[in-house]
Image: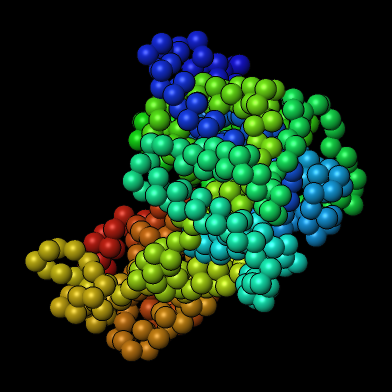
Amino acid sequence: MFKKLIPALEWMPNYKRSDLSGDMSAGLIVAIMLIPQGMAYAMLAGLPPVIGLYASTIPLLIYALFGTSRQLAVGPVAMVSLLVLAGVSTIAEPGTDEYISLVLLLMLMIGMIQFLMGVLRLGFLVNFLSHAVISGFTSAAAIIIGLSQLKHLLGVKLEADKDVFKILFESISRVSEINPITLTIGLVSILILIGLRKFVPKIPGPLVVVVLSISTIYFLQLQQAGVKIVGEVPKGLPSLSLPVFTLDAVMALLPIALAISFIGFMESIAMAKAIAAKEKYKVVPNKELVGLGLANIGGSFFAGYPVTGGFSRSAVNYQSGAKTPLATIITAILIILTLLFFTGFFYYLPNAVLAAIIMVAVYSLIDVKEAKHLFKIKSVDGWTWVITFIATLTIGIEQGILIGVVFSLLVFIVRSAYPHVAELGYLQEEKVFRNIKRYPEAKVDPEVMIFRVDASLYFANMTFLEDKLCERVGEKPETKWIILDFSGVNSIDAVAIHSLEEIMESCRKGDIAFLFAGIKGPVMDLLKKANWDKKYGGNLRHLSVEHALKAINK
């Protein structure tokens, strides 16, 4: 019973000593990576950098107990940080006490939404977020994230923050105000991060640039030359506090809470499943929702901000030898020790370096190859990517993903309203029935029309089916029998059944009889409820097209 509620009870009693070295190594490396990243992402979210460290403690410990992935690295991520800024900055000024309070409430709401989705087994809802939408949104958001850090890279306080075109225009118009030392520190950091990632991937680039930049600022006292630094980072652990709850704030934050709940879970489950497939164990989506939900709920009481599983850190965690969630626990403990004893080390950390870490991290999220791939296979999916990308870039983060989702659902509705249908003919040598448009040599009996439907039938696509049948019957006036091959029909609704009856009655006046072949069990159950077994008798029970042809001596 408890093992079902707390997945950690499955791996803890059976922990192998041989896994310890891998878990310790991975825990240390991810902590080294997460400390600067957590601070950078908190800054991206409009929060004090220390909140990124707070978000990397309690939530990690909770997820290690309740999550089902053994290698997923949970914590602050760039995408969620941007969404937090986009949603909460419309209500309060970033960095203020009111803003921080609203972020804590947002984290609690996200946790509650994910937890309830997991308990109610609603994980399937994320399937309505098409991959094309997520890829287009992520690519646009990555550009917005990167450009939002220009103010820290240039050392210029830009007024524009989320509109990429305004950011670029203002940056160009204020080029004379750029702090050359700040820009140099940022650019050198970017080059080091890219170089280490490409040529020496085992060395943690963020840690290297953090140490080098802090040393440089400290010895040369460059903060006196206008280089912005992090400054005092509060020492110690966050105290327990309750998020301030008001109905107006909840209603204002609900849209962004839903967006982060879905997008955060999708990012998390995608990585968790990929690693689980390689390691041959099972990740349970609904339990993952519970684990992430509890992690966010717990973090909201300890001054954190929304967390989820990250792609890059999870990959590093896995490649560094993590075998169990103990690696995540070790990461959290190391960050707790950092908060207790080493926050003073970050006093001279330049904001430009944190901006560089963010820019390099999100660059890989821009996925133009995916757009080309989608256009190559099916252009409408490519257009879904493009529309989501443009909408996110030009209109806004929340509106962009909403437009993408609505467009993808419209595409789905249009596809289902115009299902694939085919008239079949017989290939004598192969002894199979195939679409006569693809196989013109297939034999067709002028008195028999075999019509296959390759989709579920419901109220919206029955007019299309009727039009196609009538069109073909008009082209084949000798038709006496129509055999409907239902082997591709997985479900049918009451309106579709009624429409079929009307079609059959209309055709019966023209002396055309209907036979059905390959009806699946669930569809047959519904047809029986409509008394079709009494109305049409044996015409329903043909297991295949061949059986139906034998019944009419063809």
Q: Position of residue 90 (x, y in %)?
A: 80, 60
- Is residue 265 found left or right of 434 in the rendered image? right
Residue lying farthest to the left in this orientation = 429
Nearest the eye: 151 or 52: 151
Nearest the eye: 272 or 73: 73
The answer, for residue 112, to whether it is visible in the render is no
Work out which quarter of the rendered image holds the C terminus and state it.
bottom left
Residue 70 vertical position relative to residue 412 in the rendered view, above or below: above
Nearest the eye: 448 or 149: 149
Residue 118 vertical position relative to residue 406 in the rendered view, above or below: above
Q: Position of residue 534 (x, y in %)?
A: 49, 58
| Rendering quarter of residue 210 | top right
Which residue is painted at 52% across and 77% down in the image? 463
Work out which quarter of the rendered image holds the N terminus and state it.
top right
Which residue is painted at 51% across and 17% down in the image? 10
- Is residue 240 found left or right of 436 in the rendered image? right
Which residue is painted at 81% across and 44% down in the image? 100
The answer, for residue 270, to whether it is visible in the render is yes
Which residue is painted at 45% across and 27% down in the image? 26
- Is residue 529 found left or right of 90 in the rendered image? left
Residue 395 vertical position relative to residue 346 in the rendered view, above or below: below
Q: Position of residue 495 (x, y in %)?
A: 59, 66
Q: Position of residue 324 (x, y in %)?
A: 47, 23
| Rendering quarter of residue 394 | bottom right
